[in-house]
Image: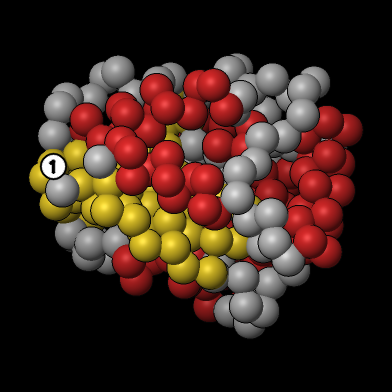
Amino acid sequence: MMFNSSLFKRYLSIYSRNPLIVKLHVMMRLLSCPFSKIEPFIPKKGAILDFGCGFGCFTHYLQLTSYERNIIGCDTAEDKIAQASSTINKDRNIRFHTGSLDFLEKESLDCIVIIDVLYLIPQEDWRALLDRCYFLLKTGGGFLLKEMDKEPLWKFRWNNFQETLSVKIFKVTTGSSFKNDKQFYFKSSEELSNDLTKIGFRVEVVRVDKGYIHPHILYLCRKV
């Protein structure tokens, strides 16, 4: 991405009280993930869930780009939610929650976003999570799923190498429900699109990896 000094300064202010390792992780996410290509597909107002939010990097991005959004950041990692919670000011429409999605009510959300989470979860557990997202969305609500594609091969291999360092060696990406001693879990865009369609979503696939060394792919899903 193009370096945005203004955005980085705002994030440094938001995370000013967090440890250096958290600041570095957030800055790397801003550089490596195409937030600016994902955000335009998200409603400018309404109830938005960022599941697998980690330290809240994209959660804050959603709020910085529209103050009319009411945003919930949810993650299974208590340590990350503790760090994320320390960044909230009383005037921000953001709250963070540790754990699963069981605390939310049926058809209570306008949009759900999951960014780079499924690959850490065994594929036999994907259906339950995706079904839950469908259950929580209002009719017509949007579900944005950002994952890594298996093509082009060189980007896929680079991503696997980097994730091996981050998850299995440096333990940067962790969560209580993630089996980090196991393999990563990826599907082709065709396979995952079919899975989402079977659940009941209308699905459009958009590549968002131009200018990035990772094979970012976005599934734009609508509850119909």
Q: Is residue 154 left or right of residue 176?
A: right
| Residue in the image at 38% along x and 33% along y | 130
**Residue 51: image location, x then y, percent:** 42, 37
| Residue in the image at 30% along x and 36% along y | 199
Q: Is residue 170 left or right of residue 98?
A: right
The quarter holding residue 136 reads top left
**Residue 206: image location, x then y, percent:** 46, 68
Which residue is labeled 1 in the image? Answer: 138
Secondary structure under the numbered disc 1 in the rendered image: strand
Answer above or below: position of 73 versus 105.
below
**Residue 169: image location, x then y, percent:** 88, 33
Colour scheme of the picture: secondary structure
Q: Amino acid at mark 1?
A: Lys
The quarter holding residue 186 reads top right
Q: Nearer the viewer, residue 15 or 169?
A: 169
Answer above or below: position of 2 versus 41.
below
- Number of residues whose C-alpha sits closer than 10 Å to that of mark 1, classed few (under 14), some (14–19) or many (20 or more): some
Q: Nearer the viewer, residue 2 or 217?
A: 217
Q: Nearer the viewer, residue 100 or 13?
A: 100
Q: Is residue 46 left or right of residue 173?
A: left
Q: Nearer the viewer, residue 79 or 192?
A: 192
| Residue in the image at 23% along x and 25% along y | 104
**Residue 56: image location, x then y, percent:** 49, 45
